Image (spheres, rainbow, N blue to C red):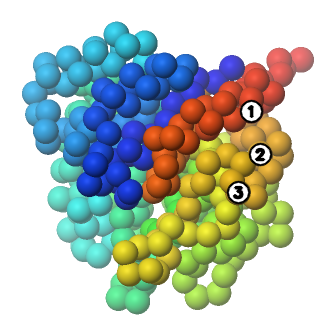
């Protein structure tokens, strides 16, 4: 059986930005609902490297979480204020990444999440080859830093960030063969990238085989999994334009988890976590319990690999 966690950012951003849920209140609810852990959104008001600069204080926070019977499935590092594609000087990004790796070490977190920071519209001002070189060169350096900290580095590709076509994902994976680098497969992002073609620059690149074809394309390089539904739409930015994938709770979308989850369950990951992501969902706090029930059902059916004979 897989261990189950949920991203803490669901209770701090979007609809919860003005009234975030306290981190330890989140942990108390998760323990009550039978979760095994929490995936930390490492930005205010939840624990983060800037607000907790001392190693001893970080260790105290981590110890409190573990005393509650929970573990950390990963860290969503706060890198969105940095420049990756739109600069030829990645020193600021690398410095911030390193700080978050140090934070992971102190907290006992083994996986750190990244994305390409800038939206797909960046190609209007930066040519694709330059953008690709900047991402690959910087992430190669970050992979080495993560490896020095004993960390897995997982890239969450999605409609809201550059390099959001299936072939983009494969190209970057091929360019960064490091063993501790891979992709996070989020089922709502998989739908929007492979089936809908949301926010693809230029011509849409959708796959005839949908998510199953995308999973096959990425097979062997998936190192983290997020499970949540998709209604084939994007969350809207404040100006009403598409931003990134919507994250509706299980049963409120169109995904066939009985085909997608078995395909993902066959992948060999460096850990045994499945993480729920309710990012931007307006009733995430209320939906947490039903999502836990749904993922438990999937876990009971597909969470145990058949023994190799």
Mark 1 vs 3, N-terminal side:
3
Q: Are marks 1 and 3 in contact (CB under 8 Å)?
A: no
Residue behind mark 1: 298
Is 165 rendered above or below residue 272? Answer: below
- Residue 253 lies in what quarter of the image? bottom right
Work out which quarter of the rendered image holds the C terminus and state it: top right
Work out which quarter of the rendered image holds the N terminus and state it: top right
Q: Is residue 33 left or right of residue 81?
A: right
SS at badge 3:
loop
Taking the spot 40% from the left edge, 63% from the top edge, the residue there is: 116
Residue behind mark 3: 253
On the question of residue 129 being in view, the answer is no
Cα–Cα span, label 1 and label 3: 16 Å
- Residue 45 lies in what quarter of the image? top left
Cα–Cα span, label 2 and label 1: 8 Å
Where residue 230 appears, x then y in whole percent?
Answer: 66, 58
Is 2 rendered above or below residue 117? Answer: above
Residue behind mark 2: 257
Q: Are marks 2 and 1 in contact (CB under 8 Å)?
A: yes
- Residue 174 lies in what quarter of the image? bottom right
Q: Is residue 119 left or right of residue 82?
A: right
């Amino acid at each position: 059986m897989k261990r189950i966690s949920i991203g803490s950012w669901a209770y701090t951003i979007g609809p919860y930005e003005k009234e975030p849920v306290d981190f330890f209140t989140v942990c108390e609810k998760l323990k009550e609902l039978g979760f095994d852990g929490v995936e930390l959104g490492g930005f205010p008001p939840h624990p983060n490297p800037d607000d907790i600069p001392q190693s001893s204080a970080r260790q105290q926070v981590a110890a409190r979480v573990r005393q509650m019977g929970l573990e950390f499935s990963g860290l969503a590092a706060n890198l969105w204020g940095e420049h990756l594609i739109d600069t030829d000087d990645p020193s600021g990004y690398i410095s911030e990444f390193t700080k978050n790796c140090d934070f992971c070490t102190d907290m006992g977190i083994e996986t750190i999440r990244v994305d390409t920071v800038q939206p797909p519209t960046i190609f209007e001002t930066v040519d694709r080859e330059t953008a690709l070189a900047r991402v690959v060169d910087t992430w190669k350096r970050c992979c080495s830093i993560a490896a020095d900290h004993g960390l897995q580095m997982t890239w969450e590709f999605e409609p809201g960030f550059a390099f959001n076509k299936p072939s983009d994902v494969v190209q970057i994976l091929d360019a960064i063969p490091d063993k501790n680098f891979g992709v996070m497969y989020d089922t709502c992002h998989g739908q929007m990238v492979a089936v809908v073609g949301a926010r693809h620059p230029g011509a849409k690149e959708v796959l005839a085989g949908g998510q199953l074809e995308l999973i096959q394309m990425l097979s062997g390089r998936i190192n983290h999994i997020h499970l949540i539904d998709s209604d084939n739409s994007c969350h809207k930015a404040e100006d009403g334009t598409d931003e990134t994938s919507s994250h509706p709770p299980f049963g409120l979308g169109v995904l066939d988890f009985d085909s997608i989850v078995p395909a993902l369950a066959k992948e060999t990951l460096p850990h045994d976590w499945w993480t729920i992501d309710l990012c931007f969902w307006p009733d995430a706090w209320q939906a947490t319990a039903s999502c836990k029930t749904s993922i438990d059902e999937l876990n009971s059916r597909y969470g145990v690999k058949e023994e190799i004979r």
